[in-house]
Image (cartoon, helix red, strand yellow):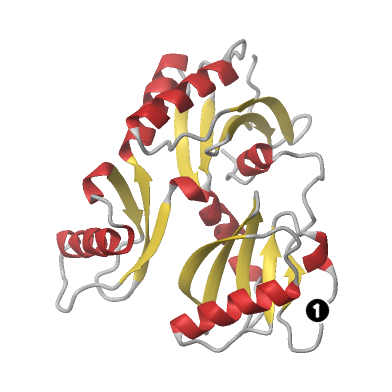
Amino acid sequence: MRRFPGQALRLGIAPTAVSLLRTSRWRGDKVTVLAEQVLDGTAAATPVGAAALAQALRTLLEGQDVAGWPVGIVLADELCRLWQVTPPPGATRLADIEAAAALRFASLYGEPPSAWTFSADWDARDSFYACAMPRVLLAMLQALADERQMYIVEVVPHFVTAWNRWHRSLRAGAWFGQLHDRMLTLAAIDDRALRAIRAVPVPHGADHYWLTQTVHREALLLGLAVPSLVQLCGPLPAALARPAQEGQVACAQLGAAPAGDASPAILLARAGSPA
């Protein structure tokens, strides 16, 4: 497959499917779907799950001439961990805040930090957010890229792509949410600062009453005022798209609604940054 300037590949990786897209900044279609592969949803954070995912990716790439191409990888939020870290008093070294992030991770998720790779905007003076991705998954992706002679330009959680794109468009006092594959990743915001990130399954028929109850619960747990508006990106369920009743939290769509025939795995890959 001949590569023209401004073109790159994008992989979307979820527990249930993987997809491959070609993106182009200047030539032809901006996004072209090349392939999609369904898998059984085995946890990719385990060696068995990573092996199953590697096989699915090899099947996905069969017949694709990808050698020499840059590839950006978007991971479903279920495969990653996102959490807030408060630096310990008197922290001055990177090692201090890395240790604080590891301790907070173990406390929140009950998993050994050694199995995960951490990334963050490290800050010894103020709270910051950290991300963890499974080491076994990252190692498998790098081995696959080496095998197919691709070079990885980024590996990023889905929520991070949405936050980077939309956080400057949020109205004062609003919260942010990302809808994807019946999961709402909700960002609680106070005084334009990100206070917490919560992933909540979206039940069938979810409406403004459900959203109101969910937002009230999270605001109570965080000690924050309940927002009057949640701005959402991703496919908006019909029940949520209808106007809210009095006393309910309203929602508004950020950007155009995704194409109705695009699968969750394709929408995941489309979310990445231009390579």
Vertical placement of 221 versus 106: above or below?
below
Q: Is residue 80 left or right of residue 88?
A: right
Q: Residue at x 72, y 77 (%)?
A: 209
Q: Position of residue 192 (x, y in %)?
A: 54, 79
Q: Position of residue 121 (x, y in %)?
A: 36, 61
| Residue farthest top in this picture | 63
Query: How many numbered callouts?
Result: 1
Q: Residue at x 52, y 77 (%)?
A: 218
* Residue 25, picture quadrant: top right
Crowdedness of circle 1 by 10 Å Cα count: few (<14), some, many (20+)? some
What is the three-letter code of the residue carrying label 1?
Ala
Q: Is residue 196 left or right of residue 117?
A: right
Quadrant of the rendering where the N terminus is positioned: top right
Q: Secondary structure at mark 1?
A: loop
Q: Position of residue 145 (x, y in %)?
A: 44, 23
**Can you identify the residue that label 1 sits on?**
244
- Give whichever of 7, 64 is nearer the camera: 64
Vertical placement of 73 versus 222: above or below?
above
